[in-house]
Image (cartoon, rainbow, N blue to C red):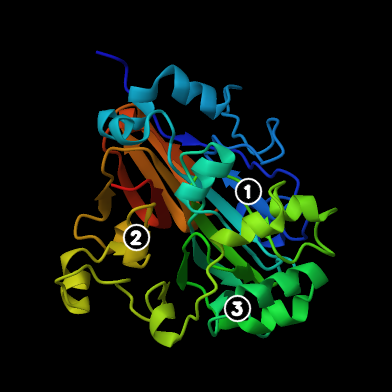
Amino acid sequence: MPEPLEPIVLPANQPPQFYRGGAAIAALRGDEAREYGPEDWIASTTTRFAGGPDGLTRLPDGRWLAEAVTADPRGWLGDAHLRRFGDSTALLVKLLDAGQRLPVHFHPDDRFARSHFDSHFGKTEAWIVVGTSGDEPTVYTGFRETTPAATVRDWVRDQDAPSMLEALNAVPVAAGDTVVIPAGLPHAIGGGVFVVELQQPTDFSLTMEWRDFLDSPEKGHLGLGFDTALQVLDTSGWDEQRLASIIRRSGDPAGPTPAGHTPADHAASDPAVAELLAPLADGFFRADRLRPSAAPSSAVTLTPGFTVLVAIDGAGTLTSERGSTPIVRGDTVVVPYGAGAPELSGDVTVLRCRPPA
């Protein structure tokens, strides 16, 4: 029998970015802030689009996580995962602290990514808001009204940023809110919004508003040309009803309710585990909030599988066959399939991020 693997507490992994931010990440982790360290790529086997090692997670023992997974895919991912996704973790998790508004951009879907980037994965993503600053923390999601493709092409050609931004839904957010961003949906994150982001494991961002952010339009369309890139843009209108299918608010303490349950049923069945994302995310990733102190046993047992944990408050312990791992606010932890079913205990709040079931 192979020796069980163990959960691993990860160091920060902040590849250089073009936009400002990082103070909220530093505050969460207890580190020194960097002006251009707005993203921390957690348990990443994904490189930046430009190539090279930027983006990859290095484990405390010096190995790249990608190398460790390739060397023992069954131990890290499990047989069921391997049958569906091969030796890809099928997930990238980030801390993202927008120190300024991000540009208006969108991402390719799986079919477009296969055709143009030779990738099994596009880039659907989701945000879990963990903190905000400023008077009006806002994210921007989807066009308010169906917009002619020719109009969008004109905005991109002229770099008419005010028109692009005005055309989007401006959505106020608070800590605990979640937003799923389907591939193709135009979006931006406003300054002062701090999120845990789950996404498919790629770095494909098609940036309509490239001026004042990127060095060239080529970096905006990733070498495809905007005529090609814009083919995957969702230009349809997103009214309040459609937005409700991707946004969940923090007002329900039990989180979004599974089909067939009332909120009261959900809260009573497991007050320590709250599902966070709208159902549209189910085919791409899963996220829930764990509060073991709310469980009758004061502990939550994790399901075996590749898992990323982000501790956002308090302190606790993660106990597996290999022993106990302290986990405190700001820690990020990768849990391999081969760690079995660790038990999380203590007065700690943790976001659990996983690939699709």
Of mark 2 and mark 1, the one earlier in the sequence is: 1
Q: Nearer the viewer, residue 327 or 72?
A: 72
Q: Residue at x 65, y 41 (%)?
A: 13
Give the image quarter of residue 318: top left
Numbered mark located on residue 225 in the image: none
Which residue matches tag 2?
291
Q: Which label sits in the foreground, 2 or 1?
A: 1
Kind of residue at badge 2:
Arg
Element under disc 2: loop
Q: Residue at x 52, y 42 (%)?
A: 115
Q: Residue at x 59, y 34 (%)?
A: 57
Which residue matches tag 1?
40
Give the image quarter of residue 79: top left
| Residue 189 vertical position relative to residue 324 in the rendered view, above or below | below
Pointer 3 and pointer 2: residues touching (CB < 8 Å)? no
Kind of residue at badge 1:
Asp
Which residue matches tag 3?
148
In the rendering, at what x and y percent does residue 251 appear?
A: 38, 81
Mark 1–mark 3 distance (CA, rounded to whole Å): 36 Å
Element under disc 3: loop
Quadrant in which the N terminus is drawn? top left
Mark 3–mark 2 distance (CA, rounded to whole Å): 46 Å
Note whether residue 134 is visible: no
Q: Nearer the viewer, residue 307 or 111?
A: 111
